[in-house]
Each structure stands twice: as structure tokens, then as C-alpha cells.
Amino acid sequence: MESADTNSEVENDAEMKLLRDKFRLSAIAITESQAKHNGMTVSKVVVTCIADLAFKYTEGVAKDLRLFAQHANRKSVNMEDVILCAHRNEHLSGLLRTFSNDLKAKDPQSERKRKKETKKNDK
């Protein structure tokens, strides 16, 4: 039994390292692209620091999102959790609300919601 737990932990660690590395590579590519676009050069040390800070920030946001969902007795994160997580940045929060509203306008009500509304109306 202990062996299965250890294997699972090793797999989770390996997956986390892979995700972190992919995230860092993406952050480095974005940083270098933006620097080039703005006619700047950024040292490799600074680019690496930016990538590490972005990853750590993202870890914190992910933890907050999980806690918001748990607080609402849900197992998955929804758009309102994301918007709530961005509440300190008014500009970002506004963009997320607009994005959310645009998605809702494009996507008709899900079948699940329609079934719930039908059941409520039947009672």
C-alpha cells in the first residue's frame, strides 16, 4: 500500500516539474518576444526571474481558486471564482467580466440548467 502512495507521489512530482518547466519556457518566450517588440533587450537572469515570479504567482492564484470553489461546496472552479480572484485589479476584473458575459451570450444555456429549471417549474 505504501509503495502505491510513493509511486503516486513520484508521478505527481514529475508531472509538476514538467508543468513548471513548460510554464517557465512559455514565460521566457513571452518575455523575450515583448522585449523584442519594444526594442529592448533583457538579460537572461532577469528573464528567468520573471518566469519564476510568474510561476509562483500562478501557484498562489490556483490555490485561491481551489479555496473559493471549496468554500462554495464545489469540486470545480468556475468563472465567478476567477473574477473574484482578480478583484484587486479592477482593469483585469472588468476584462474578465466582459469576457464571461461574451461567453454567456454566445453559449445558450446548458442542457443541465434547462433540466433544473424545468423540474422547478413542474413543482
Image: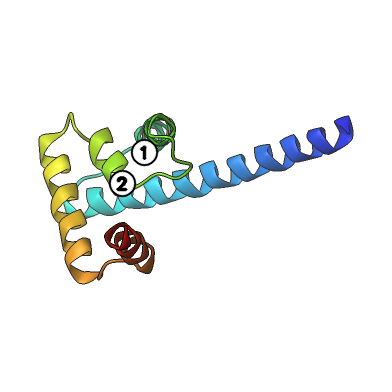
In the image, what residue occupies the spot 80% across and 34% down? Answer: 5
Q: Position of residue 3 (x, y in %)?
A: 88, 34
Residue plotted at (51% across, 49% down): 22
Lower position in the chain sequence, tag 2 or tag 1: 2
Q: Position of residue 61 (x, y in %)?
A: 37, 33
Residue 67 as seen in the image, left or right of residue 114: right
Report the quarter where the N terminus lies.
top right
| Residue bearing the label numbered 2 | 31
- Do the numbered discs 2 and 1 sit on residues whose CB atoms are within 8 Å? yes
* Percent position of residue 38, x then y: 16, 50
Q: Which mark is residue 47?
A: 1
| Of 97 and 120, the residue lying toward us | 120
24 lies left or right of 86: right
Residue neighbourhood size for the residue with mark 2, other residues' Cα within 10 Å, grouped as few (<14), some (14–19), many (≥20): some
Which element is circle 1 on? helix
Disc 2 residue type? Thr
| Extreme residue in the front direction | 123
75 is higher (above) or lower (below) than 38: above
Q: CA distance from mark 2 to mark 1?
A: 7 Å
Give me the disc on residue 83: none
